[in-house]
Amino acid sequence: MTAHTPRILTDGESALVDAFETAATGSDDQRQAAVDALRTNGLPTRRVEAFHYTDLRALIKGKPRLAGRPDDAATKQAGGAFPRLVKDAAVLHFYDGHHFDRQEPMPAGVDVVADLPAYTVSTEPDQAVEWINVAFAQSGAQISIEPGAQVEQTVGIAHAHTGAENTIAAMRCNIVAGAGSSSRLIDRAMGRDGVNYLHSSMVDLTIEDGAKVDYVLSIEEGDAAQRLARLAVNLGKDAVLNLFILNVGGKLVRQEIDFQVRGEGASLNISGVNLIGGEAHIDVTSTITHHVAHTDATETFRNVATGRGRGVFQGQINVRQAAQLTDARMACNTLLLSDDCDFSAKPELEIFADDVQCAHGATVTDLEDSYMFYLMARGISETRARQMLIKAFVAEIVEELDDDDLVESLEARIDAWMETHV
Amino acid sequence: MLEIKDLHVRIAEDETEIIRGLNLSAAAGEVAAIMGPNGSGKSTLSYVLSGKEDYEVTQGSITYNGQDLLEMDVSERAAAGVFLAFQYPVEIPGVPTMTFLKEAMNAQRKQRDEVELTTPEFIKRVRAAAGDLKIDFNMLKRPVNVGFSGGEKKRAEILQMSLLEPKLCVLDETDSGLDIDALKVVSDGVNHLRDPNRAVIVITHYQRLLEHIVPDTVHVLSKGKIVKSGDKSLALELEEKGYADIIAAAA
């Protein structure tokens, strides 16, 4: 028999364990299990398949501590740089992982309990995003949309980091969209550039039978921030999800999106824009599992990489044996704009049903020379011409959102990114 | 306005020499026609004037209003007033025509230290110019040249030219792909821009366009050189005798 010797943790790993022990978040079994899983497995390396392109063990550095509750002045300053994406939203505010009640009344049919939802942690070696969230989450919310409610007003979940260096901010939300309801949520994470912090966010979204959810995930973390996050979605019968993801910030982003399509007739429409510049490493890892027949999913990402940016898109589609007549389509189109940037796209299809349609495609291009020449031949500078063509490449996806205000706000974030990186 | 001296140009990629010792000048107010058979270097000349990267100037000079044109990049040349009407205008998906026009007009104004156009003023100008060229304003809501017919693309080029008010216009086979009515509209558009302060270089295969845009000078281009120059009667002579005779006689 071989006795297991405990792993020797890297500095980054032991810093996380130390941060947990110092913070003394309470004797909670799940928190303890999460930290034990971290201690036992360590952070995943390239050898863990799901982290093949994002070696967390190498990337997570520093000696962070759990963020304390910031004072009011700091929270006011943190939000100021980020105007709202839509005017009419009722927003739940979080700063440094702590909930702040700003007394914004929720629309009729939406109930919010500002408590951290319970979670049972998995100890599988590829669940590092969960371990860190469960170990450190400070606050959260449970949002229920009443069955049948047609909610016009947007519900916002906004996290802003106030700028405390080397801190961990973690939060977790549960959202249940009741049967037949209709709603829109905007989930936003913001932070100042140049501040080293770790933001962990997990959202569990259940869309019950016949419900429709429009969900916008806008990742605007600071350029020195690390974000480890997951959005997990369960779709019931005839449920509809339109998800849009914008990535315009973060030094390291691991955004997992997981979809369990469990009800017949469910429909999933995922689109996103990832802007990867400077030293950023942006990883979007998507898993879609079709459990039942007659469901469809489309997934389209447009990526722009420049500087020394590294992008990753892993798109897995699982079609279970019962899931006949699944229609799943995935596209990942990338513009590579510098010699030192790169992008890895990995589609994975695992199909056990015999009557399905699944398609995937990935393209990588530079800006078209003939377009550049034409624009410049009209006096437009090289930089502006590049910006116009990049904008055209991503705007096609953004403009599918059926709301002019929202499109304008998101495009303003994109323009701001281009001003810095193009 | 434009002075080309002993110009030699080759394709950067395979070093094929296309322009071989070309001399040409065009004065303000002049309309110069450049005619020549296929492969004589007509389009290359237009690309070299506008600064396309795929070509390499190995010898000679191009002076534009006293400036060394070859030292300027594509957008600087355009902002300084050089305009190329493309033989094959490019379709650019995702870039709305109006956004493009506004960017282009303001880029040039910025170069000249003028204030940017306000949106109403911009729209007013585009509407007026589109009306003159019989371009449906709704067409301009589409992305640049996307879904335009051949004739519409050529008219859109002239629209851009009239909005940007260049000093040196280079028209590269603007007549190709045009029916007779469109040819008339496009020619009227160009004639409208004839001005004592502006030079126009019309590159064409055929004399037909020159019936509408009557040139002051005509130059015959063959194997990368101007082999004969004259007035508008030279174009008629070419039409009658073909290129072979003239080129043989000039050699």
Image (cartoon, grey):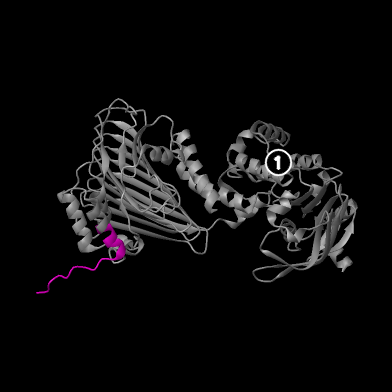
Q: Determine the residue located farthest toward the left in the rendered image.
A: A1
Quarter of image, res B157: top right
Q: Determine if the magenta segment contains residue A202.
A: no
Q: Which residues are magenta?
A: A1-17
| Residue type beneath disc 1 | Leu
Q: Is residue A174 visible?
A: no
Q: Is residue A346 visible?
A: yes
Residue B138, compared with residue A29, is above or below; it is above
Residue at horizontal 88 percent and vertical 66 percent from the top: B250
Q: Nearer the viewer, residue A225 or A56?
A: A225
Q: Determine if the magenta segment contains residue A10.
A: yes
Residue at horizontal 64 percent and vertical 34 percent from the top: B137
Is B176 positioned to the left or the right of A228 in the image? right
Residue B24, compared with residue A261, is above or below; it is below
Residue B47, compared with residue A392, is above or below; it is below
Q: Nearer the viewer, residue A266 or B38?
A: A266
Please provide percent x and percent y for residue B89. Answer: 65, 50
Q: Which residue is mark 1?
A: B159
User: How would you rate the neighbour count of disc 1 (Cα within 10 Å): few for under 14, some for 14-19, many for 20 or more?
Assistant: many
Residue at horizontal 81 percent and vertical 51 percent from the top: B207
Q: Quadrant of the N terminus of chain A?
A: bottom left
Element marked by disc 1: helix
